Amino acid sequence: MTTIKEESSNKAFGGWQKVYSHDSKELGCHMKFGVFIPPQADSEQVPVVYWLSGLCCTEQNFITKSGSQQHAAKHGLLVVAPDTSPRGCNIEGEEDSWDFGTGAGFYVDATEEKWKTNYRMYSYVTKELPAVIAANFKVDSDKAGIMGHSMGGHGALICAFKNPGQYKSVSAFAPICNPVNCPWGVKAFTGYLGADNKDAWKTYDACDLAKNYNGPPLEVMVDQGKADNFLTQGQLLPDNLVAACANGGVPIVMRMDEDYDHSYYFISSFIGDHFDHHAKFLKD
């Protein structure tokens, strides 16, 4: 069993919001992740939902700002919130900008020499972390969902599309829908995957994956604030995802929310709806 260390524990809505740390083999560093354990886990195995956070975030942002615990407790869902990148790897340049390197792993497995040893967030999220959770918590791993925000919304979408059947449900808040065509994505993919490796870029692009999805039914739910400054800057491109899902026959509910921005005020306003969405597919 993977050794994990409890870093904090707080009672919430009949369950426990905890933070753990462990040594990650995929990332080659010490990592933290949040876990909300619902009260139902005292007596039965429960479904698990993974939350992937956005640029600059740690495991703390979601668990302290989203108000998720009451909804997870209501539905009996264990919620896992990992960090957004490796930490303390001492790679030259990883601290130089807020949208690349530390806090900006982009949920890919890097192939460029400088980054490929540590920046393997895709494998960490889809393989190593689920194994850690299954070994240490009372979860039904066959009932897993995934969701996220911004860069993490991109991560949730690609993890679901690239692993048909692993996640029964998926949702996102203001995701980076088409990273091969936005400044954030181009910067990250150039750095982690290589400027000339455009075929690899497509394998981490939700729009390309949605157009070619061939797996069990997967209904996507997205909330996007209309007052989101990153929407108007062309970083998020939700219309491209709607078109791609139509091409691939993937059902999608894209809600454009008047006056809402990119913040956790936005997320906390609709997080209950997202837990309802996941519960629909994860609870018998």
Image (cartoon, rainbow, N blue to C red):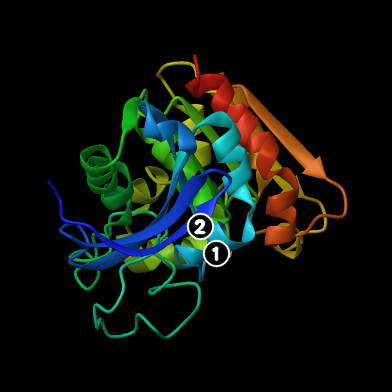
Tell me if mark 2 has few (under 14), some (14-19) or many (20+) residues whose alpha carbon lies within 10 angstroms of its own: many
Q: Is residue 121 above or below residue 100?
A: above
Question: Which residue lies at the image location 51% right of the left edge and 48% below the top edge?
Answer: 154
In the displayed image of the protein, which residue is found farthest to the top? Answer: 284
Which amino acid type corresponds to the residue marked 1 in the rendered image? Asn
Q: Which residue is mark 1?
A: 61
Q: Is residue 84 left or right of residue 254?
A: left
Q: Is residue 91 above or below residue 63?
A: below
Image coordinates for residue 135, horizontal then vertical, percent: 20, 40
Q: Nearer the viewer, residue 63 or 262?
A: 63
Question: Which of the two marks, 1 or 2, is nearer to us in this view?
Answer: 1
Q: Secondary structure at mark 2?
A: loop
Question: Which residue lies at the image location 47% right of the left edge and 81% below the top edge?
Answer: 97
Q: Quadrant of residue 4?
A: bottom left
Q: Secondary structure at mark 1?
A: helix
Q: Is residue 269 above or below residue 59?
A: above
Tell me if mark 1 has few (under 14), some (14-19) or many (20+) residues whose alpha carbon lies within 10 angstroms of its own: some
Which amino acid type corresponds to the residue marked 2 in the rendered image? Ser
Is residue 262 visible in this depiction of the protein?
Answer: no
Callout 1–callout 2 Cβ contact below 8 Å: yes
Is residue 66 visible in this depiction of the protein?
Answer: yes
Image coordinates for residue 238, horizontal then vertical, percent: 67, 44
Q: Is residue 100 above or below residue 167?
A: below
In the displayed image of the protein, which residue is found farthest to the left? Answer: 1
Q: Nearer the viewer, residue 8 or 266?
A: 8
Numbered marks: total? 2
Q: Which residue is mark 2?
A: 53
Image coordinates for residue 39, horizontal then vertical, percent: 47, 37
Label whose residue precedes the other's in the sequence (1 or 2) = 2
Image coordinates for residue 247, horizontal then vertical, percent: 58, 24
